[in-house]
């Protein structure tokens, strides 16, 4: 079979199946598996091929998973070399300093990176890795935490901001607090797109991001539960509808603000009992068009 046809087939396979399986069938398949087009984007999504070693979800996958993450990363380096521009870790895997070093040293041209929710990295490993990714434009990240301390570390995010000055898009899988908003404003002034989708989001923090990031155009708060500081050190939950001041702040500046605001309420009868159900529905989209806004 023609090598180009084989390469197109290999693009549809999981990365582990290519490097540990297809490439070892014969010399023709081996050569086809080195086609550059296969390695532009690397996604480690297969839960059964790589041992995740996640301390929070030890029973997430079958016990007969085949390969350690580090071994797979080393093999990927042999095939991909400096080609990849996008790298997506499995969201559940555990990434250590040595793992990050393998891809940062071998793949300096990464422009889009998705880190897992669990990373055991110190400041030195972060500095070493991200200093090589100066072309990084998009980062999907969970703020660096330890097993016992769950506070956002401004030191790590400050280092990311200093090394990755081309970052224009960030997606956080974490609660949007006022502290985190202040860190983002101070260290990532070039951001144009920001997402905290499916998290808790402080109203005051959201507004401070809109005001404090001069280049911000798209802000994704869809499926967020909004909170408000009470002034006593505690927060109260407002629900999924943003307050008017958040919408007004976005109207003045943003091209697009996503929030879930529409709910549908209906009643069902179960015997003699009337059950009221509320279902959160479609999204609110606000677009700046000649100073106006559009909802759908």
Image: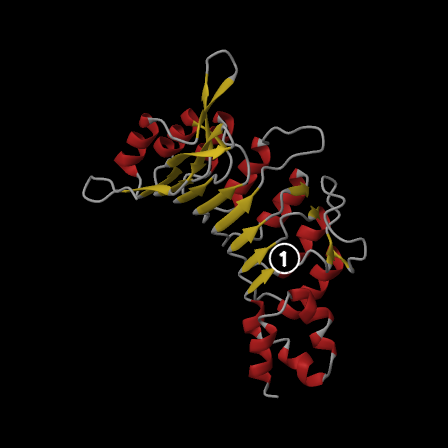
Q: How is the image coloured?
A: secondary structure
Front residue (pair 79, 280): 280
- Residue 133 against residue 75 in the figure, above or below: above
Q: Can residue 171 be seen in this view?
A: yes
Is 98 in front, or is 295? 295
Q: What residue is at 43 percent from the left and 42 percent from the top?
A: 194
Q: What residue lies at 59% left-to-right and 76% top-to-bottom?
A: 9
> Secondary structure under badge 1?
loop
In this rendering, does residue 216 appear at all?
Answer: no
- Residue, far left: 290
Decide: is 217 above or below 201.
Answer: below
Residue 134, horizontal then vertical, whole percent: 52, 52
Residue at the farthest bottom position: 1
Q: Which image quarter is the N terminus in?
A: bottom right
Mark 1 packing: few (<14 Cα in 10 Å), some, or many (20+)? some
Q: Position of residue 70 (x, y in %)?
A: 74, 56
- Position in image of residue 264 (x %, y %): 39, 36
The residue labelled by disc 1 is 45
Quadrant of the rendered image containing residue 207:
top left
For the view shown, which residue lies furthest in the right direction? 64
Q: Is 82 situated above or below 58?
A: below
- Numbered circles on residues, count: 1
Residue at 31 percent of width and 35 percent of height: 250
Tell me which corner region of the image, top left, top right, bottom left or bottom right, holds residue 45. bottom right
Q: Is the residue 135 above or below the residue 179 in the image?
A: below
- In the visual, does 287 lie left or right of 59? left
> For this view, does 12 lie left or right of residue 18?
left
């Amino acid at each position: 079979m023609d090598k180009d046809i084989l390469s197109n087939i290999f693009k549809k396979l999981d990365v582990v199946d290519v490097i540990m399986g297809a490439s070892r069938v014969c010399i023709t398949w081996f050569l086809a598996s080195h086609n550059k087009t296969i390695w532009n984007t690397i996604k480690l999504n297969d839960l059964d091929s790589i041992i995740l070693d996640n301390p929070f979800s030890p029973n997430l996958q079958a016990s007969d998973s085949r390969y350690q993450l580090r071994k797979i990363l080393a093999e990927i380096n042999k095939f991909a070399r400096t080609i990849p521009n996008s790298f997506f870790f499995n969201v559940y895997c555990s990434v250590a300093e040595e793992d990050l070093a393998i891809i940062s040293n071998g793949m300096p041209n990464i422009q889009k990176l998705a880190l897992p929710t669990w990373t055991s990295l110190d400041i030195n490993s972060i500095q070493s890795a991200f200093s090589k990714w100066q072309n990084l434009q998009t980062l999907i990240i969970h703020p660096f935490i330890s097993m016992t301390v769950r506070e956002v570390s401004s030191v790590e995010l400050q280092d990311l901001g200093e090394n990755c000055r081309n970052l224009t898009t960030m997606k956080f899988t974490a609660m949007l607090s006022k502290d985190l908003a202040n860190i983002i404003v101070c260290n990532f002034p070039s951001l144009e797109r920001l997402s905290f989708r499916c998290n808790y989001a402080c109203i005051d923090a959201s507004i401070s991001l809109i005001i404090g990031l001069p280049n911000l155009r798209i802000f994704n708060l869809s499926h967020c539960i909004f909170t408000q500081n009470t002034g006593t050190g505690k927060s109260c939950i407002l629900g999924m509808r943003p307050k008017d001041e958040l919408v007004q702040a976005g109207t003045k500046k943003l091209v697009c603000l996503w929030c879930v605001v529409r709910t549908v309420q209906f009643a069902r009868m179960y015997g003699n009992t009337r059950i009221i159900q509320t279902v959160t529905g479609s999204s609110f989209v606000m677009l700046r068009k000649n100073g106006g806004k559009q909802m759908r």
